[in-house]
Amino acid sequence: MKQRLLLNGTGTTLDEVERIIPKTTTYNTEDQPQLTGARVTMNRYALAFDLAKKDMEADGLNPSQITTVYQTEIPQALAACGFTKHTQGSIYMTEENIDQLAAIVKLQTTLAAQAPHFLKYARRVHLFEVQAWSDVTGLLTQLAVAAPMGT
């Protein structure tokens, strides 16, 4: 039985999520949402986001606190959701195949618990499937490979 489902108290319904995510699964909502007898698409995903740094500053966060948000709070929360590969700036990728809906639900729960600044200051968040990832730094620059993050 498919019903409207509020995800983690956000006001996001299953119907709204399904408009964004291709319909490849069905859900049983009698006790807890569970995948039931449907094909589940497992792929690698990337998450890209923009945070409102000016709003952080306006709310009184100092540069050290903002750095902690970007270098500790967010990476730890995203790693708990399987987004362990920090490829560039505000882009993180999964290194393992995951289910997209499960990833969204886990992101909602984990970010609420571990990264409150992310939820407060995020202005754009995009989750997208990664079909191929190629580091073309050597082809486009004089560097042999991309420099590690933070350098």
Image: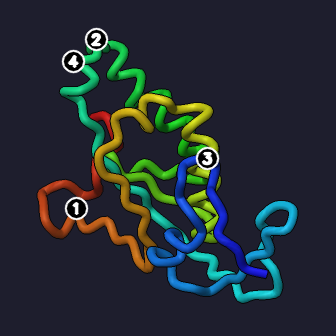
Q: Secondary structure at mark 2?
A: loop
Q: Which residue is mark 4?
A: 58
Q: Secondary structure at mark 4?
A: helix
Please name which of the two marks, 3 or 1, marks the residue nearer to the observer.
3
> Residues at badges 2 and 3 in contact (C-beta under 8 Å)?
no
Is 55 left or right of 8, judged from the image as shown? Answer: left
Residue 40 x/y as whole percent? 69, 82
Q: What residue is at 62 percent from the left and 33 percent from the top?
A: 113
Q: What residue is at 60 percent from the left and 69 percent from the top?
A: 14
Q: What residue is at 72 percent from the left and 79 percent from the top?
A: 2
The three-letter amino acid code for the residue at tag 1 is Thr
Upstream in the sequence, badge 2 or badge 3? 3
**Residue 137: quadrant of the picture:** bottom left
> Residues at badges 1 and 4 in contact (C-beta under 8 Å)?
no
Please name which of the two marks, 3 or 4, marks the residue nearer to the observer.
3
Q: What residue is at 31 percent from the left and 65 percent from the top?
A: 135
Q: Which residue is mark 2?
A: 60
The three-letter amino acid code for the residue at tag 3 is Gly
The three-letter amino acid code for the residue at tag 2 is Gly
Residue 114 x/y as whole percent? 58, 31
Upstream in the sequence, badge 3 or badge 1? 3
